[in-house]
Amino acid sequence: MDTEIKMNAKMSTFLTDKCKKITRKFYNKGSYNAFKNRVEKSIAPDYYDVIKEPMYLSEVLRKLKNNLYSELSQYVH
């Protein structure tokens, strides 16, 4: 049986749950606190000049919760 998951796989309940579990592990680990929430411009004024497509763990969890990823590749990238 082939268990390889393709990057263009549609997000099933199974995949969504696995992605939530992975993301929550990062979210709950103290060493990843800097990646939990959106970076405030007042803290890092040039951040959005350098990072063109910012993403943070709370946003990833929100998108997973609301089924906003239709393919696995959207979650990974």
Image (tube, rainbow, N blue to C red):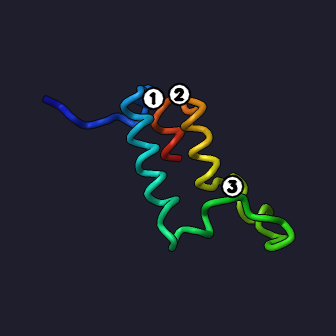
Q: What mark, if any, has residue 54 been given in the picture? A: 3
Q: Earlier in the sequence, mark 1 or mark 2?
A: 1
In the picture of the structure, the residue carrying the numbered disc 1 is: 11
What amino acid is at disc 1?
Met
Q: Which residue is mark 2?
A: 70
Disc 1 + disc 2, Cβ < 8 Å = yes
Q: Could you tell me the amino acid type at mark 2?
A: Ser
In the displayed structure, 50 sits above or below 12; it is: below
Q: Earlier in the sequence, mark 2 or mark 3?
A: 3
Location of residue 39 (image quadrant): bottom right
For the point 44% across and 35% down, the residue is: 16
Specify the quadrant of the image occupied by residue 5.
Answer: top left
SS under mark 3: loop
In front here: 49 or 68?
Answer: 68
Structural crowding at the residue carrying mark 2, measured as other residues with C-alpha within 10 Å and reported as few (<14), some (14–19) or many (≥20): some
- Residue found 86% across the figure and 70% down from its top: 42
